Amino acid sequence: MNSTTNAQDIAILKYPGGGDWYANPTALPNLIKFCNANIGTQINEKPGTVEANNSLIFQYPLLHMTGHGNVVFTDVEIENLRQYLLGGGFLHIDDNYGMKPYVIREIARLFPSKSLEELGADHPLFSQEFKFNQGLPKIHEHDGNRPQALGIFHNNRLVLLLTVESDLGDGWEDPAVHNDSEEVRANALKMGANIISYVFKS
Protein backbone atom coordinates (compact mmCIF):
# COMPACT_ATOMS: atom_id res chain seq x y z
CA MET A 1 0.00 0.00 0.00
CA ASN A 2 1.50 3.34 -0.97
CA SER A 3 1.64 6.34 1.33
CA THR A 4 -1.17 8.19 -0.46
CA THR A 5 -3.72 5.47 0.18
CA ASN A 6 -4.99 4.51 3.63
CA ALA A 7 -7.13 1.61 4.76
CA GLN A 8 -10.35 3.59 4.38
CA ASP A 9 -9.97 4.96 0.88
CA ILE A 10 -12.60 4.26 -1.78
CA ALA A 11 -12.22 4.14 -5.55
CA ILE A 12 -14.60 4.36 -8.48
CA LEU A 13 -14.21 1.45 -10.85
CA LYS A 14 -13.68 2.59 -14.43
CA TYR A 15 -14.89 -0.10 -16.80
CA PRO A 16 -14.93 -0.64 -20.58
CA GLY A 17 -17.91 -1.43 -22.76
CA GLY A 18 -19.40 2.00 -23.38
CA GLY A 19 -21.28 2.55 -20.13
CA ASP A 20 -20.93 5.83 -18.26
CA TRP A 21 -18.76 4.71 -15.34
CA TYR A 22 -18.36 8.40 -14.44
CA ALA A 23 -22.07 8.97 -13.74
CA ASN A 24 -23.16 10.78 -10.56
CA PRO A 25 -19.92 12.73 -10.01
CA THR A 26 -21.07 14.35 -6.75
CA ALA A 27 -22.50 11.15 -5.26
CA LEU A 28 -19.53 9.41 -3.71
CA PRO A 29 -17.88 12.59 -2.36
CA ASN A 30 -21.17 13.50 -0.66
CA LEU A 31 -21.51 10.02 0.83
CA ILE A 32 -17.94 10.13 2.10
CA LYS A 33 -18.54 13.49 3.78
CA PHE A 34 -21.72 12.10 5.38
CA CYS A 35 -19.88 9.05 6.69
CA ASN A 36 -16.95 11.04 8.04
CA ALA A 37 -19.38 13.33 9.85
CA ASN A 38 -21.79 10.71 11.15
CA ILE A 39 -20.22 7.27 11.58
CA GLY A 40 -16.62 8.04 12.51
CA THR A 41 -14.86 7.13 9.29
CA GLN A 42 -11.81 9.02 8.02
CA ILE A 43 -12.12 8.48 4.30
CA ASN A 44 -10.29 10.61 1.76
CA GLU A 45 -13.00 12.95 0.46
CA LYS A 46 -11.72 12.60 -3.10
CA PRO A 47 -12.32 9.01 -4.24
CA GLY A 48 -9.76 7.39 -6.49
CA THR A 49 -10.42 6.06 -9.99
CA VAL A 50 -9.05 2.65 -10.97
CA GLU A 51 -9.44 0.13 -13.77
CA ALA A 52 -10.04 -3.53 -13.04
CA ASN A 53 -6.79 -4.67 -14.67
CA ASN A 54 -4.68 -2.39 -12.47
CA SER A 55 -2.91 -3.70 -9.37
CA LEU A 56 -3.92 -0.45 -7.63
CA ILE A 57 -7.34 -1.95 -6.92
CA PHE A 58 -5.74 -4.02 -4.15
CA GLN A 59 -5.02 -0.81 -2.24
CA TYR A 60 -8.73 -0.05 -1.86
CA PRO A 61 -10.96 -2.06 0.51
CA LEU A 62 -14.04 -0.81 -1.37
CA LEU A 63 -14.67 -0.22 -5.07
CA HIS A 64 -17.82 1.53 -6.25
CA MET A 65 -19.28 1.02 -9.70
CA THR A 66 -22.27 2.69 -11.35
CA GLY A 67 -23.69 3.78 -14.70
CA HIS A 68 -26.55 3.30 -17.13
CA GLY A 69 -25.13 1.18 -19.94
CA ASN A 70 -22.95 -1.63 -21.17
CA VAL A 71 -20.12 -3.23 -19.22
CA VAL A 72 -17.59 -5.56 -20.85
CA PHE A 73 -14.56 -6.69 -18.88
CA THR A 74 -11.56 -8.25 -20.58
CA ASP A 75 -10.39 -11.67 -19.40
CA VAL A 76 -7.44 -10.00 -17.65
CA GLU A 77 -9.78 -7.60 -15.85
CA ILE A 78 -12.06 -10.46 -14.79
CA GLU A 79 -9.16 -12.40 -13.32
CA ASN A 80 -7.69 -9.41 -11.49
CA LEU A 81 -11.08 -8.39 -10.11
CA ARG A 82 -11.79 -11.94 -8.99
CA GLN A 83 -8.48 -12.11 -7.12
CA TYR A 84 -9.23 -8.74 -5.53
CA LEU A 85 -12.62 -9.90 -4.26
CA LEU A 86 -11.44 -13.31 -3.07
CA GLY A 87 -8.50 -11.64 -1.34
CA GLY A 88 -10.60 -9.38 0.86
CA GLY A 89 -11.86 -6.62 -1.44
CA PHE A 90 -15.47 -5.50 -1.83
CA LEU A 91 -17.34 -4.25 -4.89
CA HIS A 92 -20.59 -2.28 -4.68
CA ILE A 93 -22.40 -1.97 -8.01
CA ASP A 94 -25.26 0.53 -7.96
CA ASP A 95 -27.43 0.28 -11.07
CA ASN A 96 -28.09 3.84 -12.16
CA TYR A 97 -30.80 2.44 -14.44
CA GLY A 98 -29.98 0.33 -17.46
CA MET A 99 -26.81 -1.51 -16.49
CA LYS A 100 -28.36 -4.48 -14.68
CA PRO A 101 -28.39 -7.02 -17.57
CA TYR A 102 -24.80 -6.19 -18.48
CA VAL A 103 -23.36 -6.42 -14.97
CA ILE A 104 -25.24 -9.64 -14.25
CA ARG A 105 -23.60 -11.13 -17.35
CA GLU A 106 -20.17 -9.97 -16.17
CA ILE A 107 -20.76 -11.18 -12.60
CA ALA A 108 -21.47 -14.63 -14.06
CA ARG A 109 -18.05 -14.45 -15.71
CA LEU A 110 -16.46 -13.36 -12.44
CA PHE A 111 -18.02 -16.18 -10.44
CA PRO A 112 -19.30 -18.89 -12.80
CA SER A 113 -19.92 -21.30 -9.92
CA LYS A 114 -21.80 -18.81 -7.76
CA SER A 115 -25.20 -17.15 -8.03
CA LEU A 116 -26.44 -13.77 -6.88
CA GLU A 117 -28.44 -14.13 -3.67
CA GLU A 118 -30.99 -11.62 -2.46
CA LEU A 119 -30.19 -10.18 0.94
CA GLY A 120 -33.11 -10.36 3.33
CA ALA A 121 -34.08 -7.41 5.51
CA ASP A 122 -32.47 -9.24 8.46
CA HIS A 123 -29.01 -9.04 6.90
CA PRO A 124 -26.58 -6.94 9.01
CA LEU A 125 -26.17 -4.57 6.06
CA PHE A 126 -29.58 -3.11 6.91
CA SER A 127 -28.86 -2.41 10.57
CA GLN A 128 -25.13 -1.64 10.55
CA GLU A 129 -25.47 2.03 11.55
CA PHE A 130 -29.05 2.87 10.61
CA LYS A 131 -32.04 0.53 10.72
CA PHE A 132 -33.91 -0.33 7.51
CA ASN A 133 -36.66 -2.71 8.56
CA GLN A 134 -37.80 -3.27 4.99
CA GLY A 135 -34.33 -3.73 3.53
CA LEU A 136 -33.00 -1.62 0.65
CA PRO A 137 -34.86 1.71 0.35
CA LYS A 138 -36.49 2.89 -2.86
CA ILE A 139 -34.84 6.13 -4.00
CA HIS A 140 -35.93 6.52 -7.63
CA GLU A 141 -38.85 4.96 -9.48
CA HIS A 142 -37.10 3.36 -12.48
CA ASP A 143 -39.40 0.52 -13.65
CA GLY A 144 -41.51 0.64 -10.52
CA ASN A 145 -40.20 -2.70 -9.29
CA ARG A 146 -39.21 -3.29 -5.70
CA PRO A 147 -35.61 -2.47 -4.76
CA GLN A 148 -33.28 -5.42 -4.35
CA ALA A 149 -29.88 -5.94 -2.77
CA LEU A 150 -28.20 -8.90 -4.44
CA GLY A 151 -24.92 -10.38 -3.26
CA ILE A 152 -22.14 -12.80 -4.04
CA PHE A 153 -20.70 -14.60 -1.01
CA HIS A 154 -17.34 -16.31 -0.60
CA ASN A 155 -16.64 -18.28 2.56
CA ASN A 156 -19.72 -16.65 4.11
CA ARG A 157 -18.34 -13.18 3.39
CA LEU A 158 -20.27 -10.77 1.20
CA VAL A 159 -17.76 -9.77 -1.49
CA LEU A 160 -20.00 -8.15 -4.10
CA LEU A 161 -23.20 -6.15 -3.66
CA LEU A 162 -25.49 -5.24 -6.56
CA THR A 163 -28.26 -2.75 -5.75
CA VAL A 164 -31.05 -2.48 -8.33
CA GLU A 165 -34.36 -0.59 -8.60
CA SER A 166 -33.15 1.76 -5.89
CA ASP A 167 -30.49 4.09 -7.35
CA LEU A 168 -28.74 5.02 -4.13
CA GLY A 169 -26.19 7.09 -6.03
CA ASP A 170 -28.82 9.50 -7.31
CA GLY A 171 -29.85 10.09 -3.71
CA TRP A 172 -26.25 10.83 -2.76
CA GLU A 173 -25.88 13.52 -5.43
CA ASP A 174 -26.09 17.25 -4.71
CA PRO A 175 -29.71 18.20 -3.85
CA ALA A 176 -30.15 20.32 -6.98
CA VAL A 177 -29.35 17.44 -9.33
CA HIS A 178 -32.54 15.42 -8.79
CA ASN A 179 -34.57 17.63 -6.43
CA ASP A 180 -35.12 14.72 -4.07
CA SER A 181 -36.79 15.39 -0.74
CA GLU A 182 -34.64 15.57 2.38
CA GLU A 183 -36.17 12.28 3.55
CA VAL A 184 -35.23 10.48 0.32
CA ARG A 185 -31.70 11.86 0.38
CA ALA A 186 -31.32 10.95 4.06
CA ASN A 187 -32.41 7.38 3.38
CA ALA A 188 -29.96 7.07 0.50
CA LEU A 189 -27.07 8.48 2.52
CA LYS A 190 -27.86 6.34 5.58
CA MET A 191 -28.04 3.19 3.46
CA GLY A 192 -24.76 4.12 1.82
CA ALA A 193 -23.24 4.65 5.25
CA ASN A 194 -24.39 1.17 6.23
CA ILE A 195 -22.57 -0.30 3.22
CA ILE A 196 -19.38 1.58 4.02
CA SER A 197 -19.59 0.66 7.70
CA TYR A 198 -20.17 -2.99 6.79
CA VAL A 199 -17.00 -3.03 4.70
CA PHE A 200 -14.75 -1.01 7.04
CA LYS A 201 -16.00 -2.02 10.48
CA SER A 202 -17.25 -5.60 10.21
Image: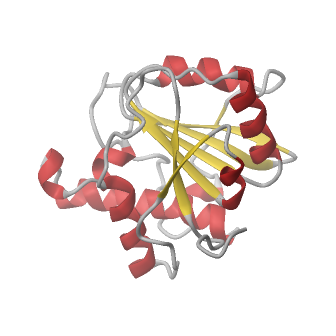
Residue 60 image point, x, y percent: 64, 59
* Quadrant (top left, top right, bottom left, bottom right) of the N terminus: bottom right
Q: Residue at x 64, y 68 (%)?
A: 200
Q: Residue at x 67, y 44 (%)?
A: 54
Residue 2 image point, x, y percent: 68, 70
In terms of image quadrants, where is residue 27? bottom left
Horizontal side, residue 177 vs residue 111: left or right: left
In terms of image quadrants, where is residue 53? top right
19 or 142: which is nearer to us?
A: 19
Q: Residue at x 37, y 31 (%)?
A: 20
Horizontal side, residue 114 vs residue 191: left or right: right
Horizontal side, residue 172 vs residue 132: left or right: left
Q: Is residue 147 visible?
A: no
Residue 158 image point, x, y percent: 72, 48
87 or 48: which is nearer to us?
A: 48
* Quadrant (top left, top right, bottom left, bottom right) of the C terminus: bottom right
